[in-house]
Image: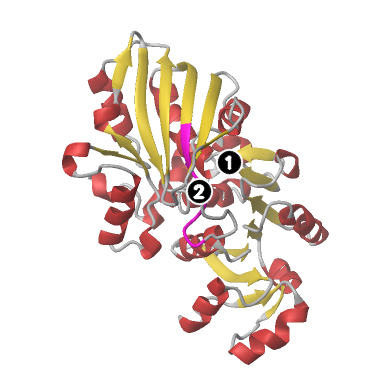
Amino acid sequence: MSKRVKVGVVGYGVIGQRLADGVALQGDMELVGVADVGPTLSIRALRERGMPFDFYLANPANRGVLEELGVPVTGSLEDLVQTCDIILDATSAGVGLKNKELYEKHRKKAVFQGGEKNAIADVFFHGYANYEQGVGQSYLKLTSCNTTGLIRAVDCFDRAVGVEKVAITIIRRVADPGDYHRGLTNALQMDKAPSHQAVDLMTIMPHIEATGILVHTPVTHGHIITVVLTPKKDLSVEEAVAHLKAHPRIRVVSINEGFLGNASLFRYARDLGNPRGDMYEIAVWKDSVVKSGKDIMFAINIPQEAVVIPESIDAIRSALKLQTTREEGTSKTNEYLGIGRWNR
């Protein structure tokens, strides 16, 4: 095997934890370590797990507190950056832009998450829709969790028969599990149309017209998106389902099987023994696939905490030219993450 590329994760929160675990599973990558600002709950849990990853401190002022807790500090954020070939930046929105100055200083490539502005990167990236545009680029930015899953489904049909336009309604979870900053609520909240997910889809897939509405809901486990898609070639419901089933990052489930909603999928992921109850695949309810004239309508579940991990790893492969085509890059990511085994 050729030498493994060195990867660092900056920001060890909801996404950063999962990025670290995902990179650690890649046979052609080495996780150098993770960085964060101090003794967050995630870092405390990392210590209790026996520090499976080296920890680098982004805020030197917190070194004393970490030492008191028994968290070994391998080095500074700059030390981590200097050691790596590429950084996965999973910090809060806006922090990545500041961190980019450090990445540029040491001429290191980086992948940013969806919360950052598009201008931070050379390419607004999705592993399936525009993998080749990221090949060899220095800075890539991922789409949000909703947009990531949505593009998977739309790209699936676009490659098979072509897509003219899509209209979406997003039923959006209001916060991640464990978040309190959103407050306690018993209400639905409307966003102004069009939703950013529809706009982002058109940015990455400019040949498709898209619009959408978003509704915030007081739940934490997963978003649900309804999609009305106009294909360039007329499809039967059975043909549409077959295309969805062929995609390794899409699960086709049904109500009759017991998948009644978002919580059913979260519970199923836990029953599978997936760490943290994570699921990399989006799910499409077979029972929701219907036709209205030529349009195909269906509903998908977005597991917001884990869905972007495969595409983030695709971004490493593209930026470092480990694989130069979508087929090779996504297949290698899927192989190491175990994606698609359930459908064999």
Residue 38, above or below 175: below
* Crowd rating for badge 1 (residues with CA inside 10 Å; few <14, some 14–19, many 20+): many
Magenta-colored span: 170-178
Where does residue 206 sit, x and y in percent of width and height?
Answer: 60, 22
* Residue type highlighted by circle 1: Thr
Q: Disc 1 marks which residue? A: 143
Residue 257 occupies quadrant: top left
Q: Is residue 134 left or right of residue 216?
A: right
Residue drawn at x 54%, y 79% as measured from the top left: 44
Secondary structure state at the residue bearing disc 2: loop
Between residue 55 and residue 300, name the one nearer to us.
300
Where does residue 14 sit, x and y in percent of width and height?
Answer: 53, 60
Q: Could you tell which of marks 2 and 1 lies nearer the N-terminus?
A: 1
Residue located farthest toward the front when viewing the structure as drawn? 186
- Spatial separation of the CA atoms under disc 2 and disc 1: 8 Å
Residue drawn at x 73%, y 73% as measured from the top left: 79
Residue contact at pointers 2 and 1, CB within 8 angstroms: yes
Residue 110, above or below 253: below
Q: Please tell me the numbered disc located at residue 255.
A: none
Question: Is residue 50 in sight in this rendering?
Answer: no
Residue 104 occupies quadrant: bottom right
Residue located farthest toward the left when viewing the structure as drawn? 256
Secondary structure state at the residue bearing disc 1: loop
Q: Please tell me the numbered disc located at residue 308.
A: 2
Residue 245, above or below 207: below
Residue 135 occupies quadrant: top right
